[in-house]
Image (cartoon, grey):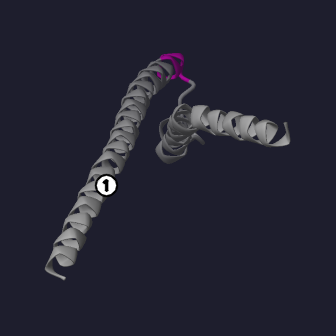
Amino acid sequence: MKKELENKAEELEQTLAKQLELLKTDSGDWIKIGGIAIAGGLIALAILKINKRKKNRSTEKALEVLEREGLLNEEIENKLRNHSNSRGFWPTLSQRLLILVLAYAKEKYLPSLFSNEDAEDAESKSEQG
């Protein structure tokens, strides 16, 4: 009886150790995905800031030229200064994140998907033959 309980306890400890090991590997994958997502977001933010600076410079130059030529009025100035792009930060970030997630899923799951199908095909052929 005591021996059975000891064996059962040892078996449970081994099962728990295996589960913890699987949890560590799975959480490592999620950390990698999170890191990729954060890096993609930071890159998208940097690109947006650079584009905004370029837009502001060109707008200021256009305003200077219009003022020099005497064609600048309040309406035109407001339109140039307050013109917002239809593309914002969040749509481009979500598109980039989607691309990153799809690329990761493709690398991780696509090879195993085809290898499983090949193994199943080989098993079905051996059963038929």
Residue 84 in view of the camera: no
Of all residues shown, which one is farthest toward the right? 128
Q: Check disc 1 and report its element: helix, strand or loop.
A: helix
Which image quarter holds the C terminus? top right
Residue drawn 64% across the image and 39% down it: 116
Residue 68 in view of the camera: yes
- Three-letter code, disc 1: Leu
Principal secondary structure, stretch drawn in magenta? helix
Q: Is residue 68 magenta?
A: yes
State the count of labels: 1
Which residue is labeled 1 in the image?
23
Viewer-closest of 53 and 76: 53
Image height of 93 relative to 44, above or below: below
Image height of 106 relative to 9, above or below: above
Residue 52 image position (x, y, % from top left):
43, 30
Image height of 9 relative to 46, above or below: below
Residue 127 image position (x, y, % from top left):
79, 43
Which image quarter holds the N terminus? bottom left
| Label 1 Cα neighbours within 10 Å, binned few <14 / some 14-19 / many ≥20 | few
Residue drawn 38% across the image and 36% down it: 36
Q: Is residue 16 magenta?
A: no
Residue drawn 53% across the image and 31% down it: 107
Residue drawn 60% across the image and 42% down it: 86
Quarter holding residue 128: top right
Viewer-closest of 18 and 77: 18
Q: Which residues are magenta?
A: 65-70
Residue 24 image position (x, y, % from top left):
27, 50
Viewer-closest of 67 and 13: 13
Image height of 49 relative to 70, above or below: below
Residue 78 image position (x, y, % from top left):
51, 41
